[in-house]
Image (cartoon, grey):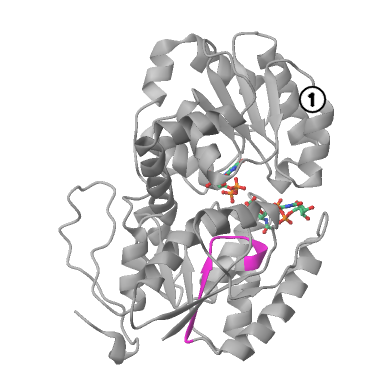
């Protein structure tokens, strides 16, 4: 069976790399990879880290790209690849323009689609924009829906979509565990990665910041920068901010914060150094989806600079707090975690509502038509419910 995995941005690559590695281990599968290149530098470093060589690279990134131009270019370019390859199944990930266009292009050609990280919802089309629409389109087009959590499964079931839903856990935990194992085993590697960062005062806690959401462009980022400026004034914290390459982020953030002695604006970090920095951080301040999933697994309190999240599990578990983008709310939440050890301890538990490192194995089992035990964050060892197998897939591939 020919499986074509399509992705294009940094987070998709991180979360699809272990899926592609698991597919490559299946003798019955011919695994091919197509990258749209929606991101360039931020994508390529992930491909190198996980040793992935795409079979097709569409090179679609342009400076400050518009969504329609990107989506249109992706649809056209992907159509030629689908015509060439004639895959038995396409795999897409998450909620990017690449994921939406790839799912739609495959749907138009009546090629079955598996959606990895299906069912995340805020039920608000502007939060995040345009991702809430992208993931709904991808879910509509898919016959296999790989929901990371029971909550995302419930969203899909309530929408009565046609695809079969399986709870797999999030593949980000598979990726995170493989990278953390490398870091834990190698003190020289950790030291080398630390040496590449700016000099940080070891007595001061590290506040790690990331941000790139389109709905925060303009006023949101102005508020975020003002809040960071005020927090930096305390003088007892090191703020490290790997700044996203999107010019709507990089421009305003650099203009507002460059030159402050304890605010370290650095280019986007490769995945390995970023994970090392997360290990060393005291608090994480972010609007990212993936970082909201990773930091709780490392026991780091996360303040999310958004009004809504499609990842409520860690909020319910108490390690993630939604703070929005008002200056005062960000400053107050950071100050409380810095100044109140009891509040910090309450947020800092190591929890894993998003996965157990077995998501890729479950996804590949499903694709191969094998029975698989679904992910259950509440039960360890895994759930007592019966293993499930997708109905109606190619009988040749069913191997119990
Ligand atoms: C995209 C996704 C978002 C995802 C995010 C992860 C969409 C609509 N948005 O947002 O869901 O969370 O990626 O980071 O799909 N750029 C570079 N080099 C890079 C990457 C980006 O120069 O390696 C610059 C380019 O000028 C590019 C711009 O950033 O035009 C914006 O990139 P784009 O993919 O459109 O949007 P993101 O904001 O990164
Ligand atoms: N990340 C990284 N380097 C950075 C910032 C983030 O490797 O400088 C990783 C992070 O660990 C996570 C992913 O990128 O796995 C999240 O990407 P991003 O925040 O761009 O997108 P989102 O998850 O919001 O779609």
Q: Position of residue 6 (x, y in %)?
A: 57, 71
- Looking at the rendering, the stretch of residues picked out in magenta corresponds to 88-98
**Residue 199 in the figure: left or right of residue 186:** right
**Residue at 68% of width from left, 16% of height from top?**
262
Q: Is residue 314 above or below residue 256?
A: below
Q: Is residue 115 visible?
A: yes
Q: Quadrant of residue 158?
A: bottom left
**Residue at 63% of width from left, 60% of height from top?**
96
Q: Position of residue 263 (x, y in %)?
A: 69, 21
**Quarter of the rendering occupied by the C terminus:** bottom left
Name the residue carrying label 1.
Answer: 258
Q: Position of residue 120 (x, y in %)?
A: 49, 56
Q: Quadrant of residue 39?
A: bottom right
Q: Is residue 123 magenta?
A: no
Viewer-side residue, 161 vs 37: 37
Q: Residue lying furthest left in this view?
A: 384
**Residue 393 in the figure: left or right of residue 42:** left
Q: Position of residue 127 (x, y in %)?
A: 63, 49
């Amino acid at each position: 069976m020919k499986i074509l995995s399509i992705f294009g941005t940094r987070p998709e690559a991180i979360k699809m790399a272990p899926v592609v590695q698991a597919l490559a281990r299946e003798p019955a599968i011919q695994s091919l990879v197509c990258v749209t290149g929606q991101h360039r530098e931020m994508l390529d470093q992930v491909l190198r880290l996980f040793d992935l060589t795409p079979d097709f690279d569409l090179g679609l990134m342009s400076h400050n790209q518009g969504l329609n131009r990107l989506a249109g270019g992706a649809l056209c370019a992907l159509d030629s690849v689908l015509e060439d390859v004639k895959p038995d199944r396409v795999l897409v990930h998450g909620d990017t323009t690449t994921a939406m266009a790839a799912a739609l292009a495959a749907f138009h050609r009546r090629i079955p689609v598996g959606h990895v990280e299906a069912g995340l919802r805020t039920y608000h089309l502007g939060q995040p924009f345009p991702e809430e629409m992208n993931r709904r389109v991808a879910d509509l087009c898919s016959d296999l829906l790989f929901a990371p959590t029971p909550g995302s499964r419930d969203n899909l079931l309530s929408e009565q979509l046609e695809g079969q839903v399986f709870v797999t856990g999030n593949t980000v935990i598979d990726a995170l565990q493989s990278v953390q194992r490398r870091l834990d085993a190698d003190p020289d590697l950790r030291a080398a990665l630390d040496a590449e960062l700016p000099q940080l005062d070891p007595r001061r806690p590290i506040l790690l910041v990331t941000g790139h959401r389109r709905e925060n462009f303009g006023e949101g980022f102005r508020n975020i920068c003002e809040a960071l400026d005020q927090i930096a004034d305390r003088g007892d914290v090191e703020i490290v901010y790997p700044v996203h390459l999107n010019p709507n982020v990089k421009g305003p953030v650099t203009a507002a914060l460059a030159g402050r002695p304890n605010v370290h604006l650095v280019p986007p970090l490769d995945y390995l150094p970023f994970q090392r920095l997360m290990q060393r951080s005291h608090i994480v301040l972010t609007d990212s989806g993936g970082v909201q999933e990773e930091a709780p697994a490392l026991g780091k309190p996360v303040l999310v600079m958004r009004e809504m999240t499609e990842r409520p599990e860690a909020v319910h578990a108490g390690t993630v707090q939604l703070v929005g983008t008002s200056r005062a709310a960000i400053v107050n939440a950071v100050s409380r975690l810095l100044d109140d050890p009891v509040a910090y301890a309450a947020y800092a538990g190591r929890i894993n509502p998003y996965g157990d490192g077995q998501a890729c194995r479950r996804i590949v089992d499903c694709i191969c038509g094998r029975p698989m035990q679904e992910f259950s964050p509440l039960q360890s060892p895994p759930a007592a419910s019966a293993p499930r197998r997708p109905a109606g897939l190619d009988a040749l591939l069913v191997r119990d």
